[in-house]
Image: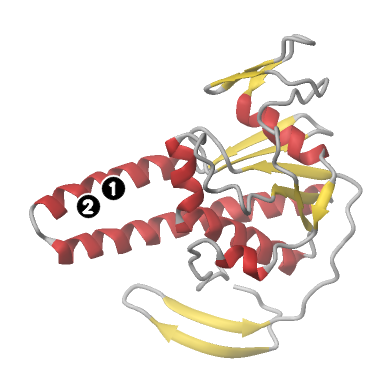
């Protein structure tokens, strides 16, 4: 909880948590000279973070996929039995768990950027969510509220610490080689470049590409977020 808030705006007490809204002074956004790239179109994680300067990679939120699948199966079984009130309870429980995971993942991403003095680059995925050729798991991830909740959490946490968030064109970030820039082959989790021979984890390769790609936008427009189903970052001071 921040200790530099100016005033308490609202306090809301739920069944398990108390949500406190406060006003705090906004620090000046630092213009970074280098960036970390965050890939959210991943195979098995919420996000993969890559730092081209150090070559370091962070794979975050692996448990979220298991949580989604576990509660999806539970809801399906309850629906078959006609226990619809329990379906809502299960859905609410999943939302709380995933929100907590998103808080931790977004905090790690922003703290990493702050500690290294770098900005955060994400793909601007607005407008490509309905591509018919996308894998089912990818479509599910980008249509889910948790996908956009993570984006919101990264943005406001970064704003609180003066870290800049920017967006890049997502075209071919997962298919281009992060070493030579040529189009390579992605097979599941493995990326191979026939041009230079580079082999890497596909999501790490995409993260490096995102980090060095030119910025096309320095903030996500409200209308962009409105196109997806978002979950308000209530309780976002964790």
Look at the numbered discs 1 and 2 and tell me whether their residues touch, using CB distance below 8 Å: yes
Mark 1 sits on what residue?
72
Q: Residue at left 81%, top 21%? A: 179
Residue 57: x and y in percent read: 68, 33
Left or right of residue 214, residue 223 in this image: left
Mark 2 sits on what residue?
75
Seen as rendered, the residue at the extreme left is 81
Q: Residue at left 28%, top 47%? A: 72
Location of the N terminus by quadrant is bottom right
Can I make out residue 206 in this image?
yes
Left or right of residue 17, residue 223 in this image: right
* Res 151 → quadrant: bottom right
Q: How crowded is mark 2: few (under 14 residues within 10 Å), some or many (20 or more)?
A: many
Indicate the secondary structure of the residue bearing disc 1: helix
Asked if 110 appears above or below 41 in the picture, the reply is below
Asked if 153 appears above or below 205 in the picture, the reply is below
Q: Closest to the observer: 115 or 79?
A: 79
Cα distance in 3D space between marks 1 and 2? 5 Å
Q: Closest to the observer: 17 or 150?
A: 150
Residue 147: x and y in percent read: 52, 53
Left or right of residue 189, residue 162 in this image: right
**Which disc is residue 119 wearing?**
none
Q: How crowded is mark 1: few (under 14 residues within 10 Å), some or many (20 or more)?
A: some
Seen as rendered, the residue at the extreme front is 132
Asked if 232 appears above or below 50 in the picture, the reply is below
Q: Residue at left 38%, top 60%? A: 95
Indicate the secondary structure of the residue bearing disc 2: helix
Q: Closest to the observer: 118 or 122?
A: 122
Residue 16: x and y in percent read: 34, 73
């Amino acid at each position: 909880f921040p200790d530099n808030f100016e005033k308490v705006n609202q306090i809301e007490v739920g069944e398990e948590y108390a949500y406190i809204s406060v006003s705090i002074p906004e620090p000046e956004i630092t213009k970074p000279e280098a960036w970390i790239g965050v890939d959210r179109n991943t195979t098995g994680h919420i996000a993969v973070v890559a730092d081209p300067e150090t070559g370091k990679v962070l794979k975050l939120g692996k448990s979220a996929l298991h949580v989604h699948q576990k509660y999806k199966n539970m809801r399906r079984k309850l629906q078959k039995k006609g226990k619809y009130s329990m379906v809502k309870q299960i859905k609410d429980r999943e939302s709380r768990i995933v929100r907590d995971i998103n808080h931790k993942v977004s905090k790690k991403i922003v703290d990493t950027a702050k500690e290294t003095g770098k900005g955060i680059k994400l793909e601007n995925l607005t407008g490509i969510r309905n591509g018919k050729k996308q894998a089912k798991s990818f479509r599910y991830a980008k249509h889910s509220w948790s996908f956009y909740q993570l984006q919101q959490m990264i943005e406001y946490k970064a704003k609180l610490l003066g870290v800049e968030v920017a967006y890049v064109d997502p075209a071919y970030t997962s298919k281009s080689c992060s070493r030579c820039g040529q189009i390579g082959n992605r097979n599941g989790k493995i990326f191979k470049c026939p041009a230079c021979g580079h082999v890497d984890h596909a999501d790490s390769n995409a993260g490096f590409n995102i980090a060095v790609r030119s910025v096309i936008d320095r903030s996500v427009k409200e209308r962009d977020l409105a196109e997806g189903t978002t979950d308000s970052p209530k309780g976002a001071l964790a």
